[in-house]
Amino acid sequence: MKRPRTMRALALTTAATLAVAASGCGGDGGGGGSAAPGVTATTVTIGSHQPLTGPAAPGYSANSAASKAFFDYVNANGGVHGRKIVYKYVDDAYNPTQTVSVTQKLVLQDKVFAIFNGLGTPTHSKVVDYLNAQRVPDLFVASGCGCWDQPGKHPQTFGWQVDYIREGKILGDHVKKAYAGRKVAYFFQNDDFGQDGVKGLDKYIPKDQVVSRQSYQPGSTDIGAQAQAIAQSKADVVVLFSIPTYTALFRLAALKLNYKPTFVVSNVGSDPITLTGLLESFAKKGGSEVEGSPLIQGMVTDGYLAAPGDASNSWTALFKKIHAQYIPKLPFNGNIVYGMSVAYTFAQALQAAGKNPTRKGVVEALEKSRFTGPGVVPFAYGADSHAGYTGAVIGTVKGQNVVPQGQPLTTDDGDGPIQPYTTPQPQAPANGIPAAG
Amino acid sequence: MTAFARRVQQRSTLARHASGAVLALAALYVLTTAAGPYRDLQIAQAAYLTCAVAGLTVLTGLGGQISLGHGAFMAVGAYTAALVIGHWGWPLAAVLPAAAGATALAGAVVGAVAARLHGPYLAGATLAFAVGLPGLANYKPLTGVLGGQNGLTIVPPVPPAALGETFPLERWQAWICCLGAVATLFLLANLTRGRFGRTLRASRDDEIAAALSGVRVARLRIAATVVSAACAGLAGGLLALVATLAAPGAFPLTLSLQLIAAIVIGGLGSLAGAMWGALILVYVPTWAADLSSSSGLSHNIASNLPLAVYGLVLIAVTLAFPRGVQGGLRDIGGAVRRRARGRRDRAPGSRGPAPSDTSGPTTTHAGGADEATPDDAGARPDDRGDAGGRGERLRR
């Protein structure tokens, strides 16, 4: 009988493979010589946690690919101070526990210079303390939670996008003025993201006008009960603070109930191209055919970056060019603009940190910065504020684009007033690379 | 055997296990001190998984009761730890026993139900437990206490000042987990070596025979579930300290299934096998993730590849070592020893190949390889992977 011998051989090979596996993931050494972790004479290595799979992946998984494309473009054009940006982004599946373990790996094993654009409120909030304790710059968190703006407690952490309280205030102000006296319902993610948004909305929309407040937990895709409750409240306006997956699920549920309110959706959950795709694929899974685009026409939302559909905008033109060169297979939408814009800001920060960047240097440079870029409103960065963009412009979905309405508005995350911002958006640099300073 | 002789033997078992535990602690001390912070974290993960897998080994490997709900027991431990740290600021020495204790209570409740169920019914009940319990965190009236999907954040355990200012947190976490793992293995080894383990194996192999000889099977099974749950609870508490977080996302159904896979890969019924299983659980996915991220694949493929590789390793190991890694190692050790003995006796041919020719594992194997080593004392020659199957057959 030959089998036992083959089995033994197979056993030995497997054991050997396992031994290699166990030893193969070491390699703590390296790095040395340079002043800051992750910085060599020719490279700067940064890391990020991103939802490449899981409930937040539809839509958001394009962000990091777009950032990567922008860094590739910068690298191809000589990099920043002669250094190429190496961008490592890892999947955390929008699961906080995985966020913790992949971030520990990026910091301890890969020894990154900074964490860049870590995505998600529930996820990133679990690593903020850790990153600050390890003194790792935690730049441009991809979430509008107001919690990133605590320079005293979290000196390393900087927000980037407009925070959800500011956004809630601007949307709430719009709802109050445009739909005075109508019944309003909220549908929001039950964590800091949705709760902050509701905080902002409540500052403007009168309490007695809100007839229903329904929330969801990311992960469970059954939101039928919430949709039913809102439909039964007969609200004329539904404000959604939801990620794209849940915006689409709610829109389909409303369609099924033949409920036709006006939808007001926060920026993070309103990208028309992402929503169109999601609506069609969810409907298909449910066994019906719908056309996504007509379902989202007239949806009200807000934005703070160059609109992807605005061909006359110099930033859109730049990003389209990079998109066509590096990631032509992905649809050009709000997520692509987002990913490239935030990568632009990082390149700016690295420029500002000087020829020999250190972790401390980049934080100090940001606090002194007066960056302008693809945003229609200014950043709030300073020694006493680590919040990102300070406002947004209301827009409506027309076709596959969000068409801005009126002027950009700025405000603070407290009880300050909402003010129009009149400085026009600057032009994109000709070579697409941010200038020093 | 006289009572005296038995007592001496018990003593020596205890001494053997104690010296093994001390040796293991010394080895782990050297290992964690030499390793970098990331390696220390991985050691910590392997250590707390060892606790959970070892507990499951007692229940499934020795008791023949399947549990698909051990991830949920870990969740109970993790949330207990998070709550007592968050609300009362208990010291570590009290937090971990609390986690194990609370989970043991949960184990008693589940065990009381499970003791009356067999096979697929038991699998179904425990599966429901694994699916349902982490969902409690999202149950509206409880979200205030349990933090919903966001979970509860835990302050990481601060290394004592006596260890110096620069003592890395990761090494301290690894030490806590390793101590937990060694203590668990030590206690389980002693427990399974004694009357408890003997009656447990007896009731697994033939329930009716065991009951006829005076074993109270239902009570025994509840006890086994309690012991096993306490181990899982400790593992959950340690997990919460390492991840500094207790959130439902840490305890998906796949965790429970991975624990089952780990006891099968490691070697059903052997405590040393539990350690192998835990190591594979920690290292294979990280290794696969490194491999896939450096391979330049599109992220759709790259982010799913680790699971596929894990599956492949599972298949390869079960094919190559039908009785798990520990069983395989024992086979290899036995074969080497037999060959050496054969050469010494100059009597090749007649006796040598015979044991390996008998198809599959049987108890006629030469004894040498089955001598219990200090760390797998729970495993006796009758703890072969087929034992549960034989019991199953007899029961029908």
Image: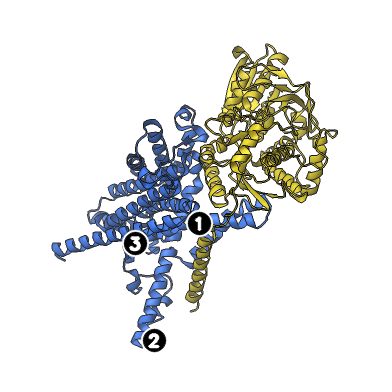
Relative to A280, residue B264 above or below? below
Query: Who comes first in sequence, dot 3 or dot 2?
Result: 2
Instruction: Estimate the spatial distance between the alpha carbons at disc 1 and disc 2, rounded to whole Å.
Output: 41 Å
The answer to whether any part of residue B117 appears in the image is no
In which quadrant of the rendered view does residue A173 lie?
top right
Q: Under tag 3, what secondary structure?
A: helix
Chain for colour blue:
B
Is there one chain holding both mark 1 and mark 2?
yes
- The residue sitting at 26% across, 50% down in the picture is B216
Give the yellow chain's letter. Answer: A
Q: Which mark is residue B283?
A: 1
Residue B194 % position (x, y): 25, 57
Residue pointed to by mark 3: B376
Q: Quadrant of the C terminus of chain B?
A: bottom left
Q: Earlier in the sequence, mark 3 or mark 1?
A: 1
- Amino acid type of the residue that numbered disc 2 sits on in the rendered structure: Pro
Residue at 41% of width from left, 66% of height from top? B327
Hey, what amino acid is under mark 3?
Asp
Dot 1 falls on a residue whose secondary structure is helix
Label 3 vs label 1: CA separation?
22 Å
Q: Name which of mark 1 and mark 2 comes first in the sequence.
A: 1
Q: Residues within 10 Å of mark 3 (few under 14, many from 20)?
A: many
Residue B93, image x, y percentages: 32, 42
* Quarter of the image where the N terminus of chain B is located: bottom left
Name the chain letter of the residue that bears numbered label 2: B
Residue A325 is left or right of residue B164, and the answer is right
Question: What is the chain identity of the residue bearing mark 1?
Answer: B
Residue B8 spot, x, y in % from top left? 18, 63
The reply, left or right, for residue A422 in relation to residue B386 is right
| Residue identified by numbered label 2 | B348
Q: Relative to residue A193, is residue A273 drawn left or right?
A: right
- Mark 3 vs mark 2, foreground winner is 3
